[in-house]
Amino acid sequence: MYDQLRPDERLIIDAAKREGIDLALYDTDQITWDITSQHDGNELADAFLQRCMSYFRSIHITAALEARGKPVVNSLRASSTCGNKLMGSIALSRAKIPTPRTFVAFTREASLKALQQLGYPAVLKPVVGSWGRLVAQIKDPESAAAILEPREYMHPIQQVYYLQEKIKRPERDIRCYVIGDQAVAAIYRNAPPGEWRTNTARGGIAENLPLTPELQEISIRAAEAVGGGAFGVDLMETDSGFVVHEVNHTTEFKNTVRVTGVDIPKLLLQYAIEQAKA
Ligand SMILES: Nc1ncnc2c1ncn2[C@@H]1O[C@H](COP(=O)(O)OP(=O)(O)O)[C@@H](O)[C@H]1O
Ligand SMILES: [Mg+2]
């Protein structure tokens, strides 16, 4: 299931050809399903890889497929948890996985109070979003007011203020891929010049990071905490070990495949097939 065919989806298509896997492509622009019937969507496939970039589109399609009894990678539970940073943080902290201290507030005034408790610098993030978009550093109360004000004129989801301590970390973070019960590959994402965010979509530079037992363990636990499936776990290094700041449910992997040589698209397809047989 896709809305756009990125290089990552093309790698999945190539892997399916190489492995002789019967892969059908569904352009979700074309979907017209009667969700009150028990049949629409039934004939499509035995299992689905959900690759829609749009979070909203993906969870609605996944809900319809799961209602037909179809396994979807990732499940509605996992993707709705991961697709919302607040839900993700709640799941991580409930599972006692080290994660940055995070507050939620709903007004500018309450956010300023929360920031007083968190201390500066802090980070404001949209609860739904990716690629580092609208993820802002807040250095002091003045810049807090300036950053929060325009959010009041945005979509109401941008007034769910997700405020987080800024972690003292090297100028990089870590992305670790977990598929089922295995951590399969990891990279450092080095921040590009003049940018504090490390997302590869913002020019972050991928570098192979050999897996260690410690990294594997925390990443697998994070994946379990959001319901299990196939994920990109985002971590940061601190003086007291790793913290997980986010678990991503529809991840891009082309840079990781390039620098680690791990065939993530093949592993994703095999995992989806296993779900069909389960
Ligand atoms: N609490 C934090 N402290 C320091 N850096 C952070 C923090 N949270 C996020 N970042 C940086 O910002 C980037 C984007 O944040 P993230 O929560 O992963 O959102 P997105 O979904 O947009 O990737 C991260 O990859 C990391 O480099
Ligand atoms: Mg991220």
Image (tube, rainbow, N blue to C red):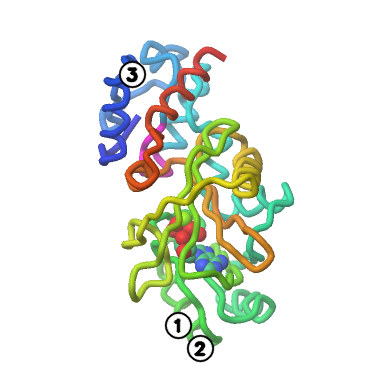
In the image, which residues are magenta?
50-57
Is residue 171 or residue 111 the one in the foreground?
Answer: 171
**In front of the other: label 1 or label 3?**
3
Amino acid found under the numbered disc labelled 3: Glu
| Mark 1 to mark 3 CA distance (whole Å) | 53 Å
Ligand 1 near label 1 (Cβ, under 8 Å)? no
Say whether marks 1 and 3 touch (CB < 8 Å): no
Q: Is residue 115 above or below residue 229?
A: below
Mark 3 element type? helix
Left or right of 39 in this view: 258: left
Secondary structure mainly formed by the magenta segment: loop
- The residue to which callout 2 is attached is 142
Tell me how far mark 2 sits from mark 1, CA to CA.
Answer: 6 Å
Task: Please determine whether, in this image, residue 85 is positioned above or below residue 158.
Answer: above
Q: Which amino acid type corresponds to the residue marked 1 in the rendered image?
A: Ala
Residue labelled with disc 3: 19
